[in-house]
Image: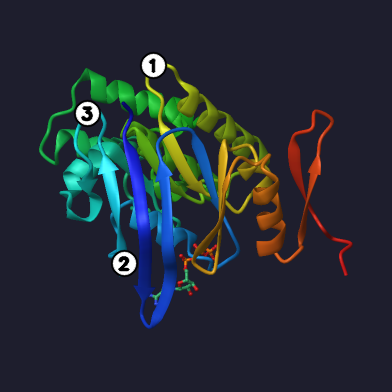
Amino acid sequence: MNPTLQALGVGVRLGRRDVLHAVSLGIGGGWTALVGPNGAGKSTLLRALAGLQPLAAGQVFLNPGAAAQPLDLHRTAPADRARVLAWLAQQGEVTGELTVRETVELGRIARLGLLGTPVAADRKAVDRAMTLTESLPWQHRRLHELSGGERQRVLLARVMATEAPMLLLDEPTTHLDAPHQVALARLFRRLTHDRSAPRAVLSVLHDLPIALQADRLLVLDAGTLQADGPPTDPAVQAALVRVFGGAIRIESDAQGRPRVALALDAT
Ligand SMILES: Nc1ncnc2c1ncn2[C@@H]1O[C@H](COP(=O)(O)OP(=O)(O)OP(=O)(O)O)[C@@H](O)[C@H]1O
């Protein structure tokens, strides 16, 4: 069995504000896109699901798979969480003096421990992650010498190098040009539909055309889950148009698949 995450009635308070209200959902596989307007609570929800955000209410359970018992995520040791969950922060933290390869190698620490000696399998995972994100050619350059989009691909490679079965990614398309956004959407499809080692991807996305390629959309507004289902679900599409205040339209392409357009002519 693949690992699963289950949020039950999750509430989060930041400062004096209730930012998430009774959010319940499960993540078990496939590619899920978390969308909603600025300030909806997407990053906060992702952090809560990663065990990084204290909860005011509710619980998050992590079932690590292989017939194990579900664990209360917020009481699980960070090293145990990190073997199952890999997280990409919204403001990708950059230690600019490290080389690209050294940065991606950091992704192996959850498996190796700080003092572990990398073996051939670790080097292979690092090479594979850089190949998947097309960052291998810069492996000996320092991070501060790269452009924003190049750096983002290195940070994604670090997440891929963990080989964690669940990837929680906050705005992974930030700074990426159109070809690399498309490549990332294809990569998510490949990773989540890989028969031998399928991974679950949950990504916060502002790019709605990319988000509509996901298997499932979570639509969040003002800290409340408004819809949860495939992009073809009319209730999901109606929630999208509503939470973005009519600034978008959902249309169908020639094959009947939904696509999104900005409602530039709306009054
Ligand atoms: N430390 C804090 N204290 C109080 N309120 C906060 C704090 N941090 C964030 N918030 C508020 O919590 C709400 C949710 O923030 P969050 O970053 O989760 O939203 P988001 O949906 O990811 O937004 P964006 O699309 O702009 O990245 C926002 O209204 C924000 O102003």
**Pointer 1 residue:** 196
Q: State which quarter of the image contains the C terminus.
A: bottom right
Instruction: Please tell me which of labels 2 and 1 falls first in the chain.
Output: 2
Residue in the image at 28% along x and 37% along y? 84
Query: Label 2: how many residues lie within 10 Å, few (<14), some (14-19) or many (20+)?
Result: some
Query: Label 1: how many residues lie within 10 Å, few (<14), some (14-19) or many (20+)?
Result: few
Residue 135's spot in the image, x, y percent?
A: 47, 33
Residue 39's spot in the image, x, y percent?
A: 53, 69
The amino acid type found where label 1 is placed reads: Ser
The amino acid type found where label 3 is placed reads: Ala
**Pointer 3 residue:** 67
Report if residue 177 is visible in the image: no
Q: Dots 2 and 1: beta carbons under 8 Å?
A: no
Question: For residue 57, which numbered disc appears in the image?
Answer: 2
The amino acid type found where label 2 is placed reads: Ala
Is residue 267 rendered to the left or right of residue 162? right
Residue projecting furthest to the left: 115
Residue in the image at 75% along x and 42% along y? 259
